[in-house]
Image (cartoon, rainbow, N blue to C red):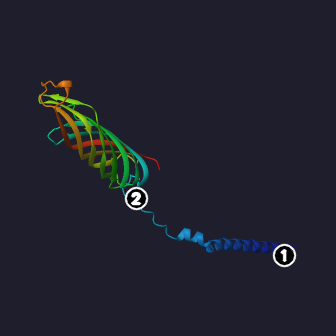
Amino acid sequence: MRGSLSFFEKMKKITLLVLGLVLALSVSAQDMFVPESEFLAKYEPSPAPLPLPPSGQWYKEYYRFYAIVGLEGAKDLSEEKASLFGISGVFGFQYRRTVAFGIGVEFLKDKSNAFSHMPVYLEFRSHLSPRRTSPYTVLKIGYSIPAGSTRKDATGMLKVNKSGIMFGADLGYRIHVNSTFAITAFVGYQAQPFQVERRVNPTEELPGGKYNDHDQVLLHMIKFGATLNIGFGF
C-alpha cells in the first residue's frame, strides 16, 4: 500500500512537471510565431515624419474672400500741389495667393478744399509669398466722383466740375497677426484727371457768378498708407 502511494506521488510529480513544460513551450511558441504585421510594427523602424510647412506659412493659398480697410494720404506732384488724406475699403475674392480681384472705394479730402473726390475702382492684387511677412502689389483702375468742393485763395477760385478715369499702383508689405488678420504698409502712385473752372480774379464780377476759365487738370499723386486685411471663407 505504501509502495502504491509512493507510485502515485511519483506520477503526480511527473504530471505536474510535464504540464509545466507544456506551458513553458506554449508561451515560447507565442513569442516565436508572432504575426507578420505585429512583428513589422514592433521591430521595423518608424516612418520618417512628414515635412512641416515652411516656417511662418500663415497665408491661405487658394479660394477665400477678403476685406480691407485703411487710412491713406496723397501728395500731388503737379502744379496744383494738392495734399489729400482719406479712408479706403475693398472687398474681393482670392483665386490664388498671387491672383486676387476686388472692388474698392476711397474718399480723399483735399486740404485746400479743392480736389476732394471719391474713386470707385477694380483692383488686381498679388501676394508674393505665403510666409508671415511678404511684399505685395496692387493695380487699380476706376472712375472718380468729385465731392463738389471749391477752393478760394488770393489767386482766385477753383471748382471741380467732373472727374475721370483713375489709375493707380501700390507696392506694400504685409505682416500677418494670424491666419485671418494682417496689417500692411504701402506706397504707390495714382493719376487722377479733373475738369475744373477757375475765376482768375476773385474781385471780378461776372453775370450769374460764372467762372471765366475752364481747364483740364491731371494730378500725379504719390500715395502712402496702412491697412487692416481680413480673410474669411473656404
Q: Disc count in the image?
A: 2
Look at label 2 and name its amino acid: Pro
Camera-near label (1 vs 2) is 2
Residue placed under numbered mark 1 in the picture: 3
Q: Position of residue 223 (x, y in %)?
A: 23, 43
Q: Residues within 10 Å of mark 1 (few under 14, many from 20)?
A: few
Q: Is residue 65 in view?
A: yes
- In this picture, residue 113 sits left or right of residue 19: left
Say what secondary structure mark 1 lies in.
Answer: helix
Say what secondary structure mark 2 lies in.
Answer: loop
Residue placed under numbered mark 2 in the picture: 53
Determine which quarter of the picture holds residue 96: bottom left
Which residue is the extreme one toward the right? Answer: 1
Q: Is residue 110 in view?
A: no
Q: Is residue 188 above or below residue 115?
A: below
Determine which quarter of the picture holds residue 87: top left
Q: Position of residue 30 (x, y in %)?
A: 65, 71
Q: Is residue 212 above or below residue 131?
A: above
> Upstream in the sequence, badge 1 or badge 2?
1
Q: Are marks 1 and 2 in contact (CB under 8 Å)?
A: no
- In this picture, residue 170 sits left or right of residue 154: right
Which residue is the extreme one toward the front? Answer: 207
Name the one closer to the observer, 214 or 4: 214
Determine which quarter of the picture holds residue 70: top left
Name the one closer to the observer, 57 or 195: 195
Name the one closer to the observer, 148 or 107: 148
Name the one closer to the observer, 28 or 63: 63
Look at label 1 and name its amino acid: Gly
Q: Residue at x 84, y 72 (%)?
A: 5
